Image (tube, rainbow, N blue to C red):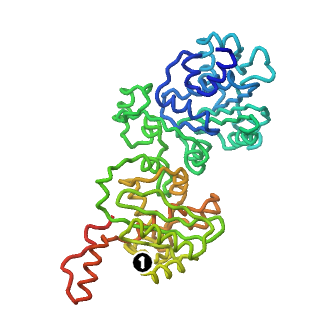
């Protein structure tokens, strides 16, 4: 095998590079990260304490340096000491284990350079001014121009947004067609409910490939490098749901702001749940439809059966009749027991036409009075969202849609003047985040009111037509 063939082989498979050049055997989760970097430009590692995340970052830095032409790699961390003591020290350790890397590169305390091209082929360690303004902090990763660039932010939980924003700018030059590569890697413990790590796991989730790494002693997929006895001791000492254990052992964000309904880890946990079909196939089916017309908002049709939300149908730019056609198609295919449509703005026309077509549609006014607990909730939307949040935490199975993490975790609530729970308005959410929570609203609509199976409703309707009184309440025990 020629050197060029070897480089191509390693460039296509970082896992192979680690095994053959560094003589290391990655853990299973590390292998996932190593292979993901080839196809993804943004990687986020949200980790517990001690799983080996700095090690995998060092591996990837060496992989990029060796297998890309004239690359520039820039690394930073929460502090200069953290960078030098951890990630930069890892680089030195792995270079010492590889005759090829030792012969090809020179390591110093602040820079790794290719011996043949030290000015254009390097990795540099940079620190950002803790007391500086946003512009000064952004300069940490600014000014890097090359056909192949990589930005690495270790312990990103406490790094300012301005630092990561500069790295984001460096991705603008990436072009597979032109042979230009740009990668952004961030990793850290989820210690903060702000900053680049938190944003990557929540509001920017669709942009990132995210790997969650846990040291939970009860998780069969736990990171094996986290000492299991230490993890059990932490749980026993502080409690399974304490912030210390959530962050350090489970690699989860601490409890969210007191005025948010759901945290990102609660949503991702619901996405990971598995349930057998026989568990839910006997439960009622409910269809929720959030209607938009043209613009950049979306019409979303979502089917939920008991604990399971199926992948929604997301539509753009449809008029009223086209939305009716889409809803009719989904209804006829799945025969749900309940159909709830948001009547705000353009939804009223959809409800009217579906009713004319004899579909059992119920229009839901998000701003109307709460249906089940009017004394507790400011309006119908707040009530549905709180019911949905409880369901997500308890048993909900959500589709694997990264945008749902943002939509479900961003809204905040407050108490109205009447001391009722009030959810942030949809327009305010869109203004604040740039995204309308249309998918989340369609799921919330499936909690508009309890639903009885269609066959029970037909029995009641028949008895009502003949004047016979029903001797049981079909809604008792049926609500989900």
Secondary structure of residue under mark 1 = loop
Residue 145 % position (x, y): 79, 34
Which quadrant of the structure image shows residue 53?
top right
* Residue 241, quarter of the rendered image: top left
Image height of 88 relative to 475, above or below: above
Side of 238 where 72 appears, left or right:
right
Q: Residue 47's x, y, as percent?
A: 50, 35
Nearest the viewer among 447 and 465 is: 465
Residue position marked by numbered label 1 in the rendering: 359
Identify which residue, 328 or 114, lies in the foreground: 328
Please give left or right for residue 10 compared with residue 191 in the image.
right
Q: Which residue shows up at 21% across the image and 81% down it?
A: 470
Whether residue 469 is visible: yes
- Seen as rendered, the residue at the extreme bottom is 467
Furthest-left residue in view?
471
- Badge 1 density bin: few <14, some 14–19, many ≥20, Cα 10 Å: some
Q: Is residue 210 left or right of residue 216?
A: right
Q: Is residue 272 shown above or below 105?
A: below
Query: Which residue is found at the position 43% from the left and 69% from the top?
Result: 331
Question: For the image shown, how many numbered marks are present on the structure?
Answer: 1
Give the quadrant of the N terminus. top right
Which percent across, then down, holds residue 283? 31, 62
The residue shown at (54%, 41%) is 210
Q: Position of residue 461 (x, y in %)?
A: 28, 82
For the residue pair 255 and 15, the one nearer the viewer reads as 15
């Amino acid at each position: 095998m020629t050197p060029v063939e070897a480089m191509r082989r390693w460039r296509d498979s970082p896992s192979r590079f680690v095994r053959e050049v560094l003589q290391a055997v990655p853990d299973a989760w590390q292998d996932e990260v190593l292979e993901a970097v080839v196809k993804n430009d943004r990687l986020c590692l949200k980790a517990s304490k001690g799983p080996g995340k700095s090690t995998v970052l060092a591996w990837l830095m060496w992989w990029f340096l060796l297998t890309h032409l004239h690359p520039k790699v820039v690394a930073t961390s929460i502090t200069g000491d953290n960078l030098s003591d951890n990630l930069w020290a890892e680089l030195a350790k792995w270079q010492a284990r590889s005759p090829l890397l030792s012969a090809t590169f020179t390591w110093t305390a602040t820079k790794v350079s290719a011996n043949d091209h030290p000015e254009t082929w390097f990795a540099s360690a940079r620190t950002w001014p803790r007391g500086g303004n946003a512009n000064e902090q952004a300069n940490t990763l600014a000014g890097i121009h090359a056909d192949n660039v990589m930005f690495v932010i270790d312990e990103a939980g406490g790094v300012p947004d301005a630092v990561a924003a500069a790295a984001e700018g460096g991705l603008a030059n990436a072009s597979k067609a032109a042979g230009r590569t740009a990668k952004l890697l961030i990793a850290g413990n989820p210690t903060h409910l702000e900053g680049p790590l938190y944003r990557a796991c929540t509001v920017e989730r669709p942009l990132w490939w995210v790997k969650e790494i846990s040291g939970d002693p009860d998780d069969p997929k736990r990171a094996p490098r986290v000492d299991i006895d230490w993890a059990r001791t932490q749980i026993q000492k502080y409690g399974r749901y304490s912030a210390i254990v959530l962050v350090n052992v489970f690699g989860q964000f601490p409890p969210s702001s007191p005025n948010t309904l759901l945290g990102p880890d609660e949503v991702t946990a619901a996405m990971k749940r598995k349930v057998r079909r026989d568990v839910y196939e006997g439960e009622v089916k409910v269809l929720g439809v959030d209607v938009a017309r043209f613009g950049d908002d979306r019409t979303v049709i979502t089917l939920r059966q008991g604990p399971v939300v199926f992948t929604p149908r997301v539509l753009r730019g449809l008029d009223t009749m086209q939305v009716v056609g889409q809803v009719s198609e989904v209804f006829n295919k799945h025969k749900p027991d309940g159909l709830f449509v948001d009547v705000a703005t353009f939804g009223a026309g959809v409800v009217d036409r579906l009713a004319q077509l004899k579909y059992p549609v119920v229009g839901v006014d998000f701003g109307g009075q709460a249906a089940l607990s009017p004394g507790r909730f400011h309006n119908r939307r707040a009530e549905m969202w709180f019911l949905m949040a409880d369901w997500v935490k308890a048993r909900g199975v959500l589709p694997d849609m990264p945008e749902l993490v943002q939509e479900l975790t961003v809204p905040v609530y407050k108490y109205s003047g009447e001391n009722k729970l009030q959810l942030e308005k949809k327009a305010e959410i869109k203004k604040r985040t740039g995204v309308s929570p249309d998918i989340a609203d369609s799921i919330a609509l499936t909690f508009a009111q309890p639903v009885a199976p269609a066959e029970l409703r037909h029995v009641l309707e028949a008895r009502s037509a003949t004047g016979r009184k029903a001797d049981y309440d079909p809604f008792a025990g049926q609500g989900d």
